[in-house]
Image (spheres, helix red, strand yellow):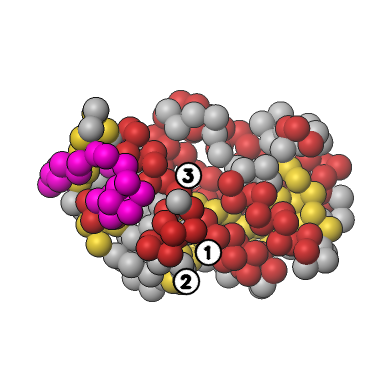
């Protein structure tokens, strides 16, 4: 099967491409470095020739409101138009748990536009909303840290390993289109403070978590349970302790 992986050079994309190639599929990497520009549409038609499945792992160059909204709206229209002409049978998007619960955040509004564009396109689809990755813990510490302190909210948190994300992306992409949004999350749910504290302790990073109940994430105010599934979800296999040991 020929599969186009848009964003195939990123954290998730590289592993998805590797797994699909190993399984015997013909994989096309959708990236500007490979001659495919989803913002201008250049190279899209050629990449989609004979393609049955498109996996969209794309991301904007910046999370700021205007950049993200412009990126996902423009790219979404280009991709959907080209896919209709090519007769693509399945379009999969990797999105974010909580996207619909904090639409006052520009980046999440942009992701919702990306989702809605494909839902309304008539192209068979699957949308996977994932919780934050285990790998994002360093960013939390960097962005929310000041000196030897890290200011962390007690919001609900249920991160998932990137390895589990790639497995689900491949699994769903090769299956029949779900025609709905599904959610994936890690096996453990706890306050965000617990995860950051554990990571600092196990990695020996000399910083102290300063907990708060401000319900903020990266300085954005969010509903307390915005970052975790509210209903049924597919559970990742790798717990946080195992991931830390593998990535020390």
Q: Is 37 or 119 nearer to us in this picture?
A: 37
Q: Are marks 2 and 1 in contact (CB under 8 Å)?
A: yes
| Residue under the image location 66 percent in, 56 percent down | 16
Q: Residue pushed farthest left?
A: 213
Furthest residue toward front: 204
Q: Which is more foreground, mark 3 or mark 1? A: 1
Q: Position of residue 241 (x, y in %)?
A: 37, 63
Residue 162 visible from this viewpoint: yes
Residue at the spot x=46%, y=26% of the render? 66
Q: In this view, does 45 lie above or below 70?
A: below
Q: Residue 111 carries which label?
A: 3
Cα distance in 3D space between marks 3 and 2: 26 Å
Q: In this view, does 242 lie to the left or right of 180?
A: left
Report whether 135 appears left or right of 194.
right
Q: Which of 94 and 157 is in front in this view?
A: 157
CA distance for labels 3 and 1? 21 Å
Q: Find numbered disc 1 in the image and state the secondary structure of the residue it sits on.
A: helix
Q: Residues within 10 Å of mark 2 (few under 14, many from 20)?
A: some
The residue at the point 53 percent across, 64 percent down is 164
Q: Which of 242 and 22 is in front in this view?
A: 242
Q: Position of residue 21 (x, y in %)?
A: 78, 60
Q: What SS does tag 3 mark?
A: helix
Q: Mark 2 points at which residue?
A: 237
Residue at position x 42%, y 46% in the image: 136
- The magenta segment is 196-221
Which comes sooner in the sequence, label 2 or label 1? 1
Is 218 included in the stretch rendered in magenta? yes
Identify the residue position indicated by label 1 in the image. 164
């Amino acid at each position: 099967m020929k599969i186009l992986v848009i964003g195939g050079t990123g954290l998730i994309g590289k592993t998805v491409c590797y797994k699909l190639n190993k399984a015997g599929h013909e994989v096309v990497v959708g990236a500007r470095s490979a001659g495919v520009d989803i913002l201008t549409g250049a190279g899209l038609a050629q990449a989609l020739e004979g393609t049955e499945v498109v996996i969209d792992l794309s991301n904007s160059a910046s999370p700021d409101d205007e950049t993200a909204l412009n990126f996902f709206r423009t790219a979404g229209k280009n991709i959907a138009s080209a896919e209709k002409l090519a007769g693509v049978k399945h379009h999969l998007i990797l999105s974010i748990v909580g996207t619909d619960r904090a639409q006052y955040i520009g980046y999440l509004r942009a992701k919702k536009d990306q989702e809605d564009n494909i839902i309304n396109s008539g192209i068979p689809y699957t949308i996977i909303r994932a919780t934050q990755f285990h790998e994002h813990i360093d960013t939390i510490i960097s962005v929310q840290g000041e000196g030897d302190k890290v200011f962390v909210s007690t919001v609900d948190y249920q991160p998932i390993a990137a390895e589990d994300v790639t497995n689900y992306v491949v699994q769903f992409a090769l299956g029949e289109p779900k025609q709905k949004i599904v959610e994936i999350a890690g096996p453990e749910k706890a306050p965000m403070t617990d995860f950051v504290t554990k990571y600092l302790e196990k990695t020996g990073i000399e910083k102290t978590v300063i907990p708060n109940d401000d319900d903020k994430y990266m300085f954005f105010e969010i509903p307390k349970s915005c970052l975790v599934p509210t209903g049924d979800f597919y559970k990742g296999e790798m717990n946080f302790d195992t991931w830390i040991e593998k990535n020390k």
